[in-house]
Image: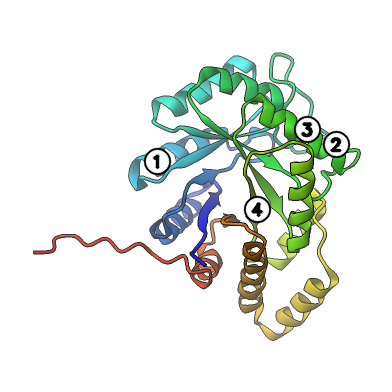
Amino acid sequence: MSAPSVSFEFFPPKSLEGSFRLWDCVNTLAPLDPTFVSVTYGAGGTTRKLTHEAVGTIHKTSGLNVAAHLTCVDATRSETLEIADGYAEAGVREIVALRGDAPKGAEKFTPHADGFASSIELIAALAETGKFTLRVGAYPEKHPEAADQAADIAFLKRKIDAGATSAVTQFFFEADTFFRFRDACVKAGIDAPIIPGILPIENWTGTQRFAAQCGTHIPQLIQDAFTNATRDGTTDLLATALATELCDDLRQGGVDHFHFYTLNRPELTRDVCHALGVTPKVRLQNVA
C-alpha cells in the first residue's frame, strides 16, 4: 500500500513566541510534501488580519499550496470579498469557506446585517469569481446546532452544490464514525471527496474541551487510556499510537488523504506521518 497524501492545519500567531512556533511547525512539516496547508480564523473573526498575513507569508516563503480560512462572521459581503481578492492577488488559489463561530460571549452565530447569512451564500459568491478551489467543513458526528445528522448532510450537499469541491471533517476518534458518515453522504448524492480530519492529541485537557464544543464523542477506552498515560507520563506515545491506528483503519477502508490538525505543535503529526510511510522528500542540490 502506497503512502497516503496529507495536509495540515495551522493557527495564525498572536505573539512573537507564536510566530516562532508557527514557522517551526511549517519548516518541520513542509518536507512531507503536503497537498495543501490551511490557516484558521479565530472565533468571531478575531484573527482575520493575522490569518491574512500568515497565509501570505507561508505562501511566499515556503512554496506550499496554502488554503486560507474565510468566514461570514462580523463582516459585510464587500469586506469579505475584498479579503478574498487580496488572497487572489497574493497568489493564493484555495479557500476553506466556513460560516465561522460566534464571537466570544455570543450564544449563537448572528449574520452581519450586510454580510453573508450562511456559508452557502459565501461559497456561491466565491465560486462566482472563478478564482478559487473551495473546500468546506463537514461533521461526521452531529453538529451541536443541527437537528440531526441528516440535516448536517443535507446542508453539506447544499455547500457542495454551491461550488465547493471537497470537504474536510471535524476530528473524530473511531474509523467507523467516518465510514458511516461517508456512506450516508454517498447515499445523499454527495460525490465530492471527503477528507478525514485527524487530531493527534497533544493536550488531553484541551482535546476534551474541543470535543465537548463540537459534539465529538470520546470513547471510554480512550478516556481510560489517557488517564493512565497522564499518570505514567506517556501521553505522547499514546497519542501517536492512537492517531496512527486510526489512520491505518481508515486506509483499510479506502482513505488515501488525511488532514491533520497540528495546533502548531508539529512533532506528533510528523511522527504519525512517518509511521504511515509519509517521509521527507529529499532534494539534492549543488551536486557535481
State the residue position of label 4.
Answer: 196
Residue at image point 67% right, 39% down: 191
Query: Where does residue 201 sit, x and y in percent of width and height?
Result: 66, 66
Answer above or below: position of 148 versus 118.
below
**Which residue occupies 75% across, 23% down?**
111
- What element does badge 1 sit on? helix
Rounded to the nearest whole Å, what is the CA distance between mark 2 and mark 1?
Answer: 36 Å
Q: CA distance from mark 3 to mark 4?
A: 18 Å
Give the image quarter of residue 241. bottom right
Q: Are marks 3 and 4 in contact (CB under 8 Å)?
A: no
**Mark 4, secondary structure of its residue:** strand
- Residue pictured at 56% horizontal, 20% vertical: 81
Per the image, label 2 sits on a secondary structure element best described as helix
Q: Which residue is mark 2?
A: 151
Left or right, residue 248 beside residue 107 = left
Q: Which of the image's four quarters has the C terminus?
A: bottom left
Cα separation between marks 3 and 2: 6 Å
Instruction: Let me know if residue 73 appears in the view.
Output: no
Judge whether 82 appears above or below 33 on screen.
above
Amino acid at pointer 3: Phe
Residue corresponding to mark 1: 59
Residue 194 x %, y %? 65, 46
Disc 1 to disc 3, C-alpha distance:
31 Å
- Disc 4 marks a residue whose amino acid type is Pro
Q: Which mark is residue 155?
A: 3
State the residue in front, 261 or 213: 261
Identify the amino acid type marked 2: Ala
Residue closer to the observer: 186 or 107? 186
